[in-house]
Amino acid sequence: MATAGLADNPTEEESMVTAKDVAELLATHPGPSEVDRETLARCIAECFDCARSCTACADADLAEEEVAEMRRCIRLCLDCADICDAAGRVVSRQTHFEPETSRAQVESCRRSCSACAEECERHARHHEHCRICADTCRRCEEACASLLDAIG
Amino acid sequence: MATAGLADNPTEEESMVTAKDVAELLATHPGPSEVDRETLARCIAECFDCARSCTACADADLAEEEVAEMRRCIRLCLDCADICDAAGRVVSRQTHFEPETSRAQVESCRRSCSACAEECERHARHHEHCRICADTCRRCEEACASLLDAIG
Amino acid sequence: MATAGLADNPTEEESMVTAKDVAELLATHPGPSEVDRETLARCIAECFDCARSCTACADADLAEEEVAEMRRCIRLCLDCADICDAAGRVVSRQTHFEPETSRAQVESCRRSCSACAEECERHARHHEHCRICADTCRRCEEACASLLDAIG
Amino acid sequence: MATAGLADNPTEEESMVTAKDVAELLATHPGPSEVDRETLARCIAECFDCARSCTACADADLAEEEVAEMRRCIRLCLDCADICDAAGRVVSRQTHFEPETSRAQVESCRRSCSACAEECERHARHHEHCRICADTCRRCEEACASLLDAIG
């Protein structure tokens, strides 16, 4: 029961359960890349989670009364959703794994998550969706950094 | 420990944990739609999971020795990833929720998951990634059907 | 010089030139579907154009002073970009062409374009980007309807 | 009739007509970024064209008799389609334009287009779709390099 101790932080629990699931699917690939599987699985899981979270946060921002003050947050969330989505797809592919192109997209994702987290953190006290989204972006940023180390 | 009893089926466990997490984020929206939140959260979670699973399955198919026999599976997995991704994004948006357009995209997603599951099931005995992907598609198909009922 | 007479309507000119180019690429496929090539090419071209136009219109809406009144337009443009993108990808695939799944996604695209065009048309007198985007959506709606007829 | 002289190279003609159209839409933005509009428009147009071309080329590769030898081409085309799509969306957004995140995604796109072009060029003599796709990737690579210069 590896997930038991994390009851207080459901999004982190979810993230770990998802990564375990992604690792299981990666293990079935007939010709996997040499990248460390756990690190890869965590990055894939975080990229898709972050795409989902940023899509929802951009939409919640749009419904806020002071939408005019949320413009930058909306813009960065939309970018981050698109960039995470592409990164998640690229690193999911193990056939003829390409360190060069994967690295550049994961680096783009790391930067986008960092920028989006920073903006969401500015609104985290007023908007709970921004607090949750900032946490998700920070986890994805870390997972991308770890994968960049693993790709070398 | 709501997830404890599901240890035998990690992908379903993951799906439930993710849906709980998505529901939590939906609950922070300043003007949510009237669609039942649990049903919506489950569909969002399944759409993103299925996009991820189909992307990985298409790539694993491509690395199989008998790739020529996996062409239809690859094609349907690529379609399903794209359609699930669009459906997951559309139903994540609660601001000015549009039953008409949401329904059509969720319906397209339900059909695509059904077609992709059927093809993956044909290869499930030989390829574990197809077995896992078929399960994910079937869960997404069900989640879409439930959401279609809830939208009305 | 088939494009010469269309100088007054550059977006329609562009659309025709793009469709010709897409048809040329489709003609190189080793096992094309039986769907009429010109109709298919036009739909592919319009889907990608519409995804591009809706992405730009949502962003321009967001920068408008009265952004609060543009919320529905932003939401529908974001949906339409995602749905058109998925439709454009699905119908681009000729290998093991699937009438069932293609039809459902093209139908979703047709509806989304119609809803988005209707909303953009409401703002067309005040915002030139909405006028252009409405035109693009209407063209994509028509191209989807034609493709649905052709698929049968 | 700026397009008249290009009849021999329809894809380049299309690209120029599309860029003109994108520039027209960008000009309607209420608060555009300071990036040179023509350079930006060209990059947006090329990113969406390249996403379309790579999606079609991956699918045509899949239908080739010697599909086993096309695996790397399929993989790189799928990556390139996803990365170009994200880049095209990100640089289409002018509201609170972010040089940092845009630059990283355009850089990723430039590299992906270069890798994909190189692989497609290896098959260009045997597969016309690879020849066309390689040309499109090279144009997108150049447009990304120009935009990177313009962003500074």
Image: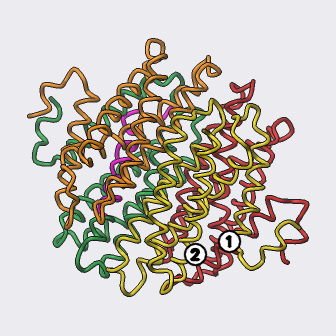
Chain colours: A red, B yellow, C orange, D green
Tell me if B111 is positioned left or right of B88 in this view: left
Disc 2 crowd rating (10 Å Cα; few below 14, some 14-19, many 20+) is many
Mark 1, secondary structure of its residue: helix
Q: Are marks 2 and 1 in contact (CB under 8 Å)?
A: yes
Tell me if A40 is positioned left or right of D17 in this view: right
Residue C68's quadrant in the figure?
top right
The residue that appears at 54% across and 78% down in the rendered structure is B131
Tell me if A28 is positioned left or right of C117 in this view: right
Q: Which residue is mark 1?
A: B11
Q: What number is the disc on residue A15?
A: none
Does B34 appear in magenta?
A: no
Q: Position of residue D62 (x, y in %)?
A: 31, 71
Q: Position of residue D76 (x, y in %)?
A: 39, 68
- Most foreground residue, C11 or A28: A28
- Most foreground residue, C3 or D41: C3
Residue B86 visible at all = yes
Tell which subunit mark 2 falls on. Answer: B
Q: What number is the disc on residue B132?
A: 2
Q: Chief secondary structure of the magenta span?
A: helix
- Against C121, is B48 above or below? below
Tell me where the magenta segment starts and ends, as one range: D33-57
Question: CA separation, marks 2 and 1?
Answer: 8 Å
Does D47 appear in magenta?
A: yes
Tell which subunit mark 1 falls on. Answer: B
The residue that appears at 74% across and 29% down in the rendered structure is A64
Q: Earlier in the sequence, mark 2 or mark 1?
A: 1
Mark 2 belongs to which amino acid? Ile
Mark 2, secondary structure of its residue: helix
Mark 1 belongs to which amino acid? Thr
Residue A112 visible at all = no
Q: Position of residue B13 (x, y in %)?
A: 74, 69
